[in-house]
Amino acid sequence: MTTTPAPATDPATAGLSAWVDVDLGAIRDNVAELKRRAGSADVMAVVKADAYGHGLLPSARAALAGGAAWLGVAQLAEALELRRAGVTAPLLTWLFAPGADVRGALDADIEVTVGSTWSLEAVLAAVRERGRAARIQVKVDTGLGRNGVLTDWSEVVAALAAAQAEGAVEVTGVWSHFAYADAPQHPTVRAQQERFVEAVAELERAGVRPGLLHLANSAATLTNPSAHFDLVRPGVAVYGLSPVPDLGSPADFGLREAMRVTARLAGVKKALAGQGVSYGHEYTTTRDTLLGLVPVGYADGVPRSAGNRGPALTGGRRYTLAGRVCMDQVVLDLGPDATVEPGDEVVLLGVGADGEPTAQDWADAAGTINYEIVTRMGPRLPRRHLGGPA
């Protein structure tokens, strides 16, 4: 596999103070690896939340190039955006509120998820308006306690069977989501799989035979082959992040981080020992040193909680943020012998195998998960999509 493209001398970044590179080749290769691990199951690449901050349309195309048979998004608006852009691959969406444009989604050949009595009623209302049956999938809540049918599964099954008998719906899939897939030995994992199989059996006894069963997210795709069923539904692993960092790094699973966040030093200045740095002076220099100003902050997605802990790489050296994260800037204590200058690059986020700070490093520093780190990178940071389909 190739390494993430490095933008060191690219004139396209000459006027930028900070930017995000997205390696589409990494996304493509990650999906191919996930498909290999899934065995006979197909892959639904989850591209919700602007593809976890990587860019919805380019990432979706890269995932399809890697062998994804399906795309999945949370919001109807994301699904419609893909269709407007000409993406014709099978597409599932699962989160909408009353009043959403269900008919528009069905007319665009988007499969919507029924996860409640009211959402089934919304689909049936759209069917009456359009005069054509709807292809839908059904989500059963097997124990996560989030969206999906929970206590009234039998009632929804009966309603689905009646709707199918009337020719109003075609149930193309049944699915659910784990609560503890990142802890494969947790007892809820087996319990949810068993509940899922029971729920599917009840649906089949009512005469509804769904085409696809899917339960495995990224963690289960990598660690639990018994949960693969017909389709696996990886999200964060598509972008090269480990969903189980305590069990393995991206490289351990044959994945490569797709996002690289780079900034340029906006200033380097001398500071004496005892100089407080940033708001509240939560960092104080211990010797005469050089301070480097990096023009990104929490408005760009740098977690404020990572002050004095977040990592950065510049001049071939690894540093930790000095003081609080501000809205637009952070500071590095570069040490007295640093040779970097204003304009030199600072890698905030990159590929661990290349020695760069990773999303997991930032997650550890901020007390969160790597999913949040990449997803929160803000629109003020221009995206460059490299190494694959645009």
Image: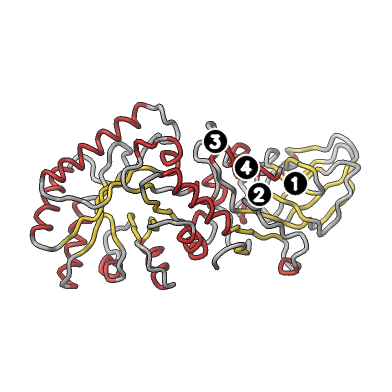
Q: Secondary structure at mark 4?
A: helix
Identify residue for label 4. Answer: 362
Q: Earlier in the sequence, mark 4 or mark 1?
A: 1
Identify residue for label 1. Answer: 313
- Marks 4 and 2, how far apart at CA: 11 Å
Q: Amino acid at mark 4?
A: Trp
- Visible residue check, residue 380: no
Q: Amino acid at mark 1?
A: Leu
Judged left or right of residue 164, residue 285 is right
Question: For mark 1, does the 10 Å Cα neighbourhood hold few (<14), some (14 to 19), or many (20 or more) residues?
Answer: many
Q: Earlier in the sequence, mark 3 or mark 2?
A: 3
Q: Amino acid at mark 3?
A: Pro
- Marks 3 and 1, how far apart at CA: 21 Å
In x, y percent, where is residue 83?
A: 39, 70
Q: Secondary structure at mark 1?
A: strand
Give the number of the mark in front: 2 or 1.
Answer: 2
Asked where in the image residue 87 lies, by quadrant, the reply is bottom left
Give the number of the mark in front: 4 or 2.
Answer: 2
Question: Is mark 4 in CB contact (under 8 Å) with mark 1?
Answer: no
Identify residue for label 2. Answer: 350
- The residue depicted at 45 percent of the width and 56 percent of the height is 67
Judged left or right of residue 193, residue 220 is right
Q: Is residue 344 placed above or below 370 in the rendered structure?
A: below
Q: Is residue 334 placed above or below 125 in the rendered structure?
A: above
- The residue depicted at 68 percent of the width and 56 percent of the height is 328
Question: Is mark 2 in CB contact (under 8 Å) with mark 1?
Answer: yes
Q: Earlier in the sequence, mark 3 or mark 1?
A: 3
Q: Earlier in the sequence, mark 2 or mark 1?
A: 1
The numbered mark at residue 245 is: 3
In x, y percent, where is residue 107?
A: 27, 71
- Marks 3 and 4, how far apart at CA: 13 Å
